[in-house]
Image: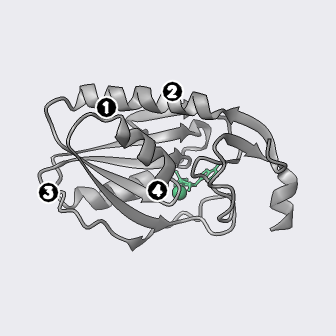
Amino acid sequence: MHKDIKQVLFSEEEIYKRVVELGEQITRDYAGQELVVVSLLKGAVYFTAELTKHIDLPVRLDFLISSSYGNTTTSAGSINVTKDIDENIAGKHVLLVDDIIDTGLTLEKITNLLETRKPLSIKTAVLLDKGSRRVNEMDADYVGFEIPDEFVVGYGLDFAGDYRNLPIIGILRPSVFAKK
Ligand code: IMP
Ligand code: MG
């Protein structure tokens, strides 16, 4: 185990198995339709890559970068779009993909932004859900795992830009926060 990880929550195998299940569920739910997957960089990159491989439908993939977290572990509350999508989503089914839903502010704000472009539908998929921290009515349509209120890293999730490439999802040691 990585020296800065206090506890592994999900192994590579557990993550893979759950992501395959989500892909199959999405395939059934959108049967006969096309999907534009909008992935929120950078955190959702590993989840999006694995998930879309298991969606057996015509999928177009696009990316959006928004920032709300600086080098801290709590949401700043405001969202800034620094890289917008290229796809025209008017009249299309959109699946917005993020690594985690925490306060819910990111998904709420990005969903509202994409709604203004008149898609046929918008649903959301997240690998992790920290439900106890929600400040709004947002809920993801597809959730990999519910997790407790702990700061986690790996499989795309970072702390101040580090740890994204860990293949597991784990709880970061509190001593690591103190150093930054
Ligand atoms: P929300 O806007 O509070 O729902 O936060 C969503 C974003 O916060 C995610 O895209 C993550 O980048 C970040 N985030 C929230 N909790 C964690 C965590 O435990 N580890 C790493 N990033 C997190
Ligand atoms: Mg993120």
Give the camera-side residue of 32 and 177.
32
Measure the alpha-carbon separation of dots 3 and 1: 20 Å
Q: Where is mark 1, residue-wise?
A: 26
Q: Which residue carries the number 4 mark? A: 106
Quadrant of the image containing the C terminus? bottom right
Q: Earlier in the sequence, mark 3 or mark 1?
A: 1
Q: Nearer the viewer, mark 4 or mark 2?
A: 2
The answer to whether mark 4 is within 8 Å of ligand 1 is: yes
Query: Label 4, label 2: how many angstroms apart (C-alpha)?
Result: 26 Å
Q: Nearer the viewer, mark 3 or mark 2?
A: 2
Among the two numbered marks 2 and 1 on one chain, the one whose residue lies closer to the N terminus: 2
Amino acid of disc 2? Lys
Residue 65 position, x and y percent, is 43, 66
Q: Which residue is mark 3?
A: 90
**Residue under the point 82% across and 51% down:** 4
In the rendered structure, which amino acid carries the disc numbered 3? Ala
The secondary structure type at the circle numbered 1 is helix
Give the mark, 4 or 3, whose residue is nearer the N terminus.
3
User: Dot 4 surroundings within 10 Å: few (below 14), some, or many (20 or more)?
Assistant: many
